[in-house]
């Protein structure tokens, strides 16, 4: 469960918390190279490969059986996905793999088990051998589905994601609902201001907010969004997503930690949004393998109590916002209130 | 009342009154009279060999077509695109009727001429043979055209062109019913492929031992409803189930519902009547979990309809699918009520059947599918491979026959 803290006021809301000591968790996959080249999601790769329908059918059958063999073992192990979810993921993998024009015909052939025309050539966006490899990774290594296809469908967006970037969660979609329903509805002038998305990851919140601002600005000068992240991989991926949605003039991606890259807009922000790490360090090893063993710890670990970053943000947000500004942070249910 | 019998007795033979030539004349003995002894004014007097009611309707259709065509050329209409569109649509719908009617009249004329010729030149054997075969072929053509005209005049089902949602639900028979439901879904997917339709899985709830408890697929393409509408009802299977250890034959059922797509305008859904829950509401979530659970559970309070949509990649998309499906279900209820009324009036055998009606039995031992409405059998293996076209056409033919009878009856009662 998660809950959001949101407020329409800025000054002096939560100034009593101590500033926590800086964290030094490093993501095991962090690179120090300056130029990280983001990977192209499967559905955007050109269909320059092919396989015969019978070869594709063979792979599909194998993949389906592998998914079915899981049963509820992952659920019992660490509350992971069951066979029904895995088979659905397989369908989505197929959707991204097969080129658009023939997709529905091929998909229905695979479903119905029609054996006619086995030699028909099907255009694919990746070689079939790679599909054996990635599906094995999915099931045996529990590599997240979204990293396998290189993208995540989130609200009305399709965002490219890869190892080193947190996969946007459905719960986070609500932050945008709050931006629109609470902030922009009650104070429409906020649509023309500067917004910040701290720890942007794939850029999900930043991009969706930019689109919301454009809608609510009604053709007047639209606001801007500054997205920050400590990880060079995240900066690269967020930038590529911003470009894909044509928002380079509205969303600026800056590398840095929390408020540090935002000194120039201190006291001027209309809104501050974030989905900071909030999982207690001790809980990380117990998480489902897709999360704990593959997603960046930098994006998940919130210190011993899980609240380090949250508190840091709450502490600083007051001075970042202009009067009447809006902030919303995602958190999980806090069971031990004494830690706060 | 048999339409065919009626037509032969009502045939109005043209009179050969002023024509005194009879068989027996030798061709060389006198000059032949021209084979058009009686004057005929095309527009006003139509000498016809078909039922009078048919001719009345056809003449009225032709008149309307002429009037509309004139209106289409009117500059006021041309400048108004919506008006023009509507008119152009009406004209094109009548095009086929009018052109077929004209061919019919032309064919009739040729038949008259040929018959006249045969009366005249009876003695030349070769000529007589040629004329006789001409007469028989023209008669055949005329009959065909007449039948075609009757069908063209039938009111068409306004839903025929629509896409549909097809729902298969396991009925009685436990696990085996679930497996049977899966077999039916596959059969319809294969039939869709044959027709180059697009079938998409919308939502499904899998059964433990295979197959589905329920499964909904969307079928999109040309005239989907017109062909699949006869599939509604209970499909019964008799076979040895996979789960059966002692080789006994079991009977289980699955219910198929065909729901034509409904416009938002046709079915209004009040947001207050809906309860929407998502897969992650109330459970562990957020950063702790990465399971792509985009499922949406939609509950429509007034009717108690519950829809579970799982297959799209975001909650937003599943929500809009769920609403689309709810609209189709509510529309189907509306449509079915209307059709029940009509069915009871018409005592129809086919047409969208009542939900609980057993329409087919699939017997594996005898490799046979029996359609109870048609009282016909089909080969099971090819049927399940999607080869159901014959059954569909047979249902369509029966419905057409029933409609024709109704048409003739209604005209008779208004005329008499």
Image (tube, rainbow, N blue to C red):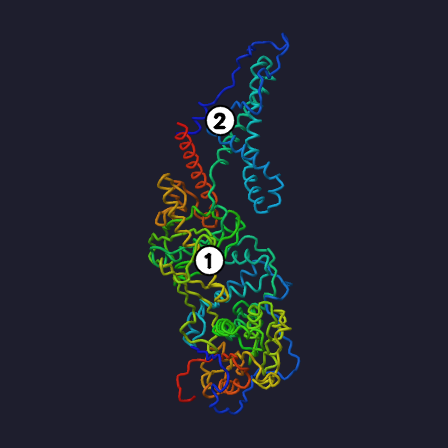
Count of number-bearing discs: 2
Query: Could you tell me residue B358's position as x and y percent?
Result: 35, 47
User: Outermost residue, top direction?
Assistant: B29
Up the image or down, A275 lies above or below B237; here it is below
Up the image or down, B182 lies above or below B363; here it is below
Query: Could you tell me residue B250's position as x and y percent?
Result: 33, 53
Chain of the residue under the numbered disc 1 shown in the image: B
Q: Secondary structure at mark 2?
A: loop
Q: Which residue is mark 1?
A: B324
Query: Could you tell me residue B232's position as x and y percent?
Result: 40, 49
Left or right position of A26 against B307: right
Q: Secondary structure at mark 1?
A: helix
**Numbered label attached to residue B50:** 2
Query: Could you tell me residue A116's position as x and y percent?
Result: 54, 52
Asked where in the image residue A195 lies, by quadrant, the reply is bottom right
Quadrant containing the N terminus of chain A is bottom left
Is there any visible trace of residue B56 in the rendered image? yes
Quadrant containing the C terminus of chain A is bottom left
**Numbered label attached to residue A285:** none
Chain of the residue under the numbered disc 2 shown in the image: B
Asked where in the image residue B173 lies, by quadrant, the reply is bottom left
The crowd level at tag 1 (other Cα within 10 Å; few <14, some 14-19, many 20+) is some
Earlier in the chain: of badge 2 and badge 1, it is 2
Left or right position of B31 against B326: right
Do discs 2 and 1 belong to a common subunit?
yes
The crowd level at tag 2 (other Cα within 10 Å; few <14, some 14-19, many 20+) is some
CA–CA distance between discs 2 and 1?
A: 47 Å
């Amino acid at each position: 469960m998660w809950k959001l803290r949101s407020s329409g006021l800025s000054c002096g809301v939560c100034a009593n918390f101590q500033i926590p000591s800086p964290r030094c968790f490093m993501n095991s996959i962090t690179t120090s190279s300056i130029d990280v080249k983001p990977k192209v999601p499967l559905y955007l790769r050109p269909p320059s490969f092919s396989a015969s329908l019978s070869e594709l059918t063979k792979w599909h059958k194998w993949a389906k059986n592998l998914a079915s063999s899981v049963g509820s073992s992952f659920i019992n192990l660490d509350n992971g996905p069951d066979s029904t979810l895995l088979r659905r993921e397989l369908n989505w993998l197929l959707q991204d793999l097969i080129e658009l024009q023939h997709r529905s015909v091929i998909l229905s052939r695979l479903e119905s088990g029609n054996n006619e025309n086995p030699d028909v050539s099907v255009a694919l966006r990746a070689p079939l051998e790679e599909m054996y490899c990635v599906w094995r990774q999915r099931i045996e290594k529990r590599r997240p589905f979204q990293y396998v296809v290189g993208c995540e469908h989130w609200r009305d967006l399709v965002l490219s994601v890869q190892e080193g970037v947190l996969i946007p969660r459905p719960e986070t979609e609500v932050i945008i609902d709050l931006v629109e329903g609470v902030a922009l509805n009650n104070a429409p002038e906020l649509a023309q201001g500067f917004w910040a998305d701290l720890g942007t990851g794939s850029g999900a919140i930043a991009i969706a907010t930019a689109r919301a601002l454009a809608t609510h600005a009604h053709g007047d000068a639209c606001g801007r969004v500054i997205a920050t992240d400590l990880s060079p991989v995240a900066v690269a991926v967020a930038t590529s997503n911003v470009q894909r949605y044509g928002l380079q003039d509205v969303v600026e991606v800056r590398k840095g930690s929390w408020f540090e890259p935002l000194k120039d807009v201190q006291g001027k922000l209309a809104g501050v949004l974030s989905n900071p790490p909030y999982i207690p360090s001790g809980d990380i090893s117990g998480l489902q393998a897709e999360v704990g063993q593959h997603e960046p710890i930098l994006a998940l670990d919130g210190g011993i109590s899980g609240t380090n970053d949250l508190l840091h943000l709450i502490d600083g947000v007051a001075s970042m916002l202009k009067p009447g500004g809006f902030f919303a942070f995602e958190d999980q249910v806090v069971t031990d209130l004494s830690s706060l | 009342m048999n339409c065919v019998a009626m037509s032969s007795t009502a045939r109005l033979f043209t009179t050969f009154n002023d024509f005194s030539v009879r068989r027996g004349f030798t061709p060389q003995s006198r000059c032949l009279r021209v084979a058009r002894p009686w004057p005929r004014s095309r527009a006003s007097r139509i000498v016809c060999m078909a039922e009078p009611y048919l001719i009345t309707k056809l003449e009225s259709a032709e008149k309307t077509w002429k009037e509309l065509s004139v209106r289409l050329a009117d500059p006021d209409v041309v400048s108004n695109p919506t008006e023009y569109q509507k008119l152009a649509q009406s004209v094109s719908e009548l095009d086929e009727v009018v052109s077929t009617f004209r061919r019919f009249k032309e064919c009739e004329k040729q038949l008259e001429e040929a018959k006249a010729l045969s009366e005249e030149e009876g003695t030349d054997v070769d000529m007589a043979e040629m004329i006789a075969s001409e007469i028989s072929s023209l008669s055949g053509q005329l009959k065909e055209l007449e039948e075609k005209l009757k069908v063209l005049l039938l009111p068409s089902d306004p839903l025929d062109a629509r896409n549909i949602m097809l729902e298969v639900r396991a009925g009685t028979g436990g696990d085996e019913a679930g497996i049977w439901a899966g077999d039916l879904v596959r059969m319809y997917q294969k039939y869709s492929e044959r027709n180059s339709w697009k079938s998409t899985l919308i939502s499904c709830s899998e059964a433990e031992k295979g197959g589905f408890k329920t499964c909904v697929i969307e079928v999109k393409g040309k005239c989907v409803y017109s062909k699949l509408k006869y599939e509604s009802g209970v499909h019964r299977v008799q076979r040895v189930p996979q789960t059966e250890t002692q080789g006994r034959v079991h009977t289980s059922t699955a219910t198929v519902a065909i729901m034509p797509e409904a416009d938002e305008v046709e079915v209004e859904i009040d947001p207050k009547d809906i309860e929407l829950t998502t897969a992650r509401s109330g459970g562990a979530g957020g950063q702790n979990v990465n399971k792509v659970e985009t499922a949406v559970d939609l509950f429509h309070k007034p009717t108690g309809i519950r829809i579970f949509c799982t297959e799209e990649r975001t909650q937003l998309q599943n929500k809009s699918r769920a609403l689309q499906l709810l609209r189709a279900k509510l529309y189907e209820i509306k449509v079915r009520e209307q059709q029940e009324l009509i069915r009871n009036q018409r005592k129809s055998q086919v047409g969208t059947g009542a939900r609980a009606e057993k329409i087919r039995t699939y017997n594996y031992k005898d490799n046979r599918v029996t359609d109870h409405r048609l009282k016909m059998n089909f080969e099971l293996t090819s049927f399940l491979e999607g080869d159901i076209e014959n059954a569909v056409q047979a249902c369509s033919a029966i419905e057409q026959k029933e409609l024709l009878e109704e048409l003739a009856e209604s005209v008779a009662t208004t005329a008499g």
